[in-house]
Image (spheres, helix red, strand yellow):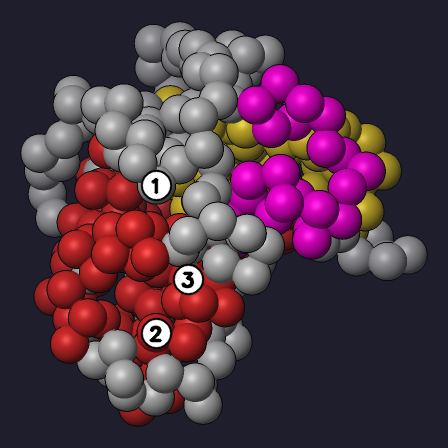
Amino acid sequence: MSDNPYQDDRGNHDLTITRPGNEGQLGSHPGTGQPMETSEAFLIGDSMTGGYGKGPDILHECTIAVNRGEIAVIVGPNGAGKSTAMKAVFGMLDLRQGSVRLDGQDITDLSPQDRVAKGMGFVPQNANIFTSMTVEENLEMGAFIRRDDIRPTMEQVYELFPILRDKRRQAAGELSGGQRQQVAVGRALMTHPKVLMLDEPTAGVSPIVMDELFDRIIEVARTGIPILMVEQNARQALAIADKGYVMVQGRNAFTGTGKELLADPEVRKSFLGG
């Protein structure tokens, strides 16, 4: 995908599959490598430093933020700490410095389970579906924290991913890689998330399937859900991104809009193949 048809048309306030919340304002300075004003961001991992257990720090004062209706993409070389930053925001490692805030509330000390209850939807790269369950059972599992009628949300997921309706009685483990990813995203949407986090959603899929998944991700963002995404396909991901973060060795190296980062000569040379 070289162009983003919704780049100037996101956040249409169609909150049918989100839980309403206050919007912040995430502004950027011209150019790349500049700090962005993040104090009012809807979701922010602010100045995060930490690692796994008692091991060395992997993140070093790393800041990642996204606002309602935006797509924020984290890119960088292998081993840069991209997925670790995502996991830090989700509470899967201890922060020695920094904080995580969601919709104005400090959630730094909450467990991942409590963050889901607060409105975080997280789709890991691996082991993100129940392979022995049907597609529909996977979606039902996604709604485990809800006590209301989930059928309207399931219908919205089927409208977003029509192939899942056709295969709703089929075991999820029998699906193609791209279809499994649709199940994983759909299951996360069943929680009525305030924010959706995707770790390498296009890993291992063909370019055609990658473009289809990115199209669906854009559609989700247009409903008003902020999306924070880690991606190895940097050029394609930045093409649909409102905000981009290039990480190197656990630190913010470049920050800007997707368009700014794609146009930056140093970013292109170092991370996008020229």
The disc labelled 3 sits on which kind of residue? Arg
**Residue range (magenta):** 101-123
The disc labelled 1 sits on which kind of residue? Ile
- Would residue 186 appear left or right of 155 to someone viewing this image? right
Q: Secondary structure at mark 3?
A: helix
Answer whether residue 143 is visible to the viewer in this image: yes
Q: Earlier in the sequence, mark 1 or mark 2?
A: 1
Residue at image location 54% in from the left, 52% down from the top: 146
Residue 107 x/y as whole percent:
72, 33
Q: CA distance from mark 2 to mark 3?
A: 9 Å
Q: Closest to the observer: 236 or 164?
A: 164
Do labels 1 and 2 touch, CB within 8 Å? no
Quadrant housing the C terminus: top left
Answer whether residue 75 is visible to the viewer in this image: no
- Would residue 131 appear left or right of 52 to someone viewing this image? left
Q: Residues within 10 Å of mark 3 (few under 14, many from 20)?
A: many
Q: Earlier in the sequence, mark 2 or mark 3?
A: 2
Q: What residue would you read off at disc 3?
A: 187
From what the image shows, is residue 117 above or below residue 15? below
Q: Residues within 10 Å of mark 2 (few under 14, many from 20)?
A: many
Residue 24 x/y as whole percent:
47, 13
Q: CA distance from mark 1 to mark 2?
A: 17 Å
Q: What residue would you read off at disc 1?
A: 17
- Say if the magenta span includes residue 102: yes
The disc labelled 2 sits on which kind of residue? Glu
Residue at image location 24% in from the left, 56% down from the top: 155
Q: CA distance from mark 1 to mark 3?
A: 12 Å
Q: What residue would you read off at disc 2?
A: 136
